[in-house]
Image (tube, rainbow, N blue to C red):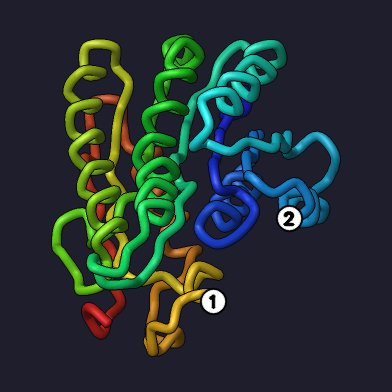
């Protein structure tokens, strides 16, 4: 029986790397992304029947509700959810607009909440259910010019820890993936000055998730912290 995996923010970066890794491992992937054109291009390379793409804005309750309605009509269960969708702005708190603040919080934190809650009925039907939330080293440490992003990521990690405890009796595992800087398109709009060549690869994150999922039922990897070999950039 194929593992059924749902990935948000699936069209590029860490999300796309996870789609690729799980397909190579023989899973069926439900790929969610906000932009239809980007999503269609990203899944075009896979054989028919390997990926089920859905346009979904995880920050929108209505969009999540409609996406999950479609999923529930086509799938009897979901085994893995990878809450990866995110965004962010590098700017001082003093110059952070309410729009940037709300967009970041709604995408990262509220999106994780909405998708997880909506998919719990299908996760409960799996014999090996696992939720992976893509957090960040900014979930544990404040970095300059990352006010809205750190607030969202700190909240996401706290949500993950509570979720883990609540779902233990249901035998649903919850893991926080905490990477440092990853070389993804996220950096294209940032004037960070970071050396992309020193960053983690998106595939490193996908490999860590695959490793955690292969653990025996009585073993839970609660957190995985990944950093570039050079340390914080």
Quick one: 13 or 63, which is closer to the camera?
63
Q: Is residue 101 left or right of residue 50?
A: left
Left/right placement of residue 222 relative to residue 21 reads: left
Counting the numbered discs, the total is 2
**In the image shown, does 78 or 188 lie closer to the viewer?**
188
Q: Residue at x 66, y 34 (%)?
A: 28
Vertically, is 80 above or below 40?
above
The span from disc 2 to disc 1 (Cα, nearest Å) is: 16 Å
> Looking at the picture, how far across and down is residue 146, in whole percent?
27, 66
On residue 31, the disc is: none
Closest to the observer, 27 or 226:
226
Q: Secondary structure at mark 2?
A: helix
Residue 188 marker: 1
Q: Residues within 10 Å of mark 2 (few under 14, many from 20)?
A: some
Q: Is residue 71 above or below residue 105?
A: above
The image position of residue 122, as x and y in percent, is 51, 14
Residue 179 x %, y %: 31, 61
Q: Position of residue 156 (x, y in %)?
A: 27, 42
Residue at image coords 64%, 25%:
67
> Label 1 neighbourhood size at 10 Å, few (<14), some (14-19), many (20+)?
few
Label placed on residue 38 = 2
Q: Residue at x 56, y 15 (%)?
A: 77
Q: Quadrant of the C terminus?
A: bottom left
Q: Quadrant of the N terminus?
A: top right
| Element class at badge 1 | helix
On the image, which quarter does residue 190 sit in? bottom left
In the rendered image, the vertical position of residue 104 relative to residue 179, given as above or below: above
When the figure is inspected, residue 7 is found, relative to residue 76, above or below; the finding is: below
Task: Say whether residue 129 is left or right of residue 2.
Answer: left
Q: Are marks 2 and 1 in contact (CB under 8 Å)?
A: no
Q: Earlier in the sequence, mark 2 or mark 1?
A: 2
Q: Quadrant of residue 158?
A: top left
């Amino acid at each position: 029986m194929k593992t059924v995996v749902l990935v948000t923010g699936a069209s590029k970066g860490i999300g796309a790397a996870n789609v690729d890794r799980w397909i190579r491992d023989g899973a069926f992937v439900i790929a969610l992304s906000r932009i239809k054109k980007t999503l269609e291009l990203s899944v075009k390379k896979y054989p028919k029947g390997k990926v089920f793409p859905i346009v979904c804005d995880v920050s929108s309750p209505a969009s999540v509700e409609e996406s999950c309605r479609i999923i529930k009509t086509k799938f009897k269960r979901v085994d893995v959810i990878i809450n990866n969708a995110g965004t962010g702005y590098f700017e001082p708190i003093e110059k952070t607009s309410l729009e940037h603040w709300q967009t970041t919080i709604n995408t990262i934190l509220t999106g994780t909440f909405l998708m997880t809650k909506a998919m719990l009925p299908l996760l409960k039907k799996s014999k090996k259910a696992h939720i992976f939330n893509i957090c960040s080293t900014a979930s544990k440490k404040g970095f300059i010019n990352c006010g809205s992003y750190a607030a969202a990521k700190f909240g996401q990690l706290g949500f993950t820890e509570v979720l883990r405890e609540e779902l233990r009796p249901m035998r649903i595992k919850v893991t926080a993936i905490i990477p440092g800087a990853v070389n993804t398109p996220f950096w294209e709009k940032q004037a960070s000055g970071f050396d992309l060549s020193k960053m983690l690869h998106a595939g490193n994150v996908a490999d860590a998730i695959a490793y955690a999922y292969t653990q025996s039922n009585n073993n839970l990897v609660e957190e995985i912290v990944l950093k570039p070999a050079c340390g914080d950039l």
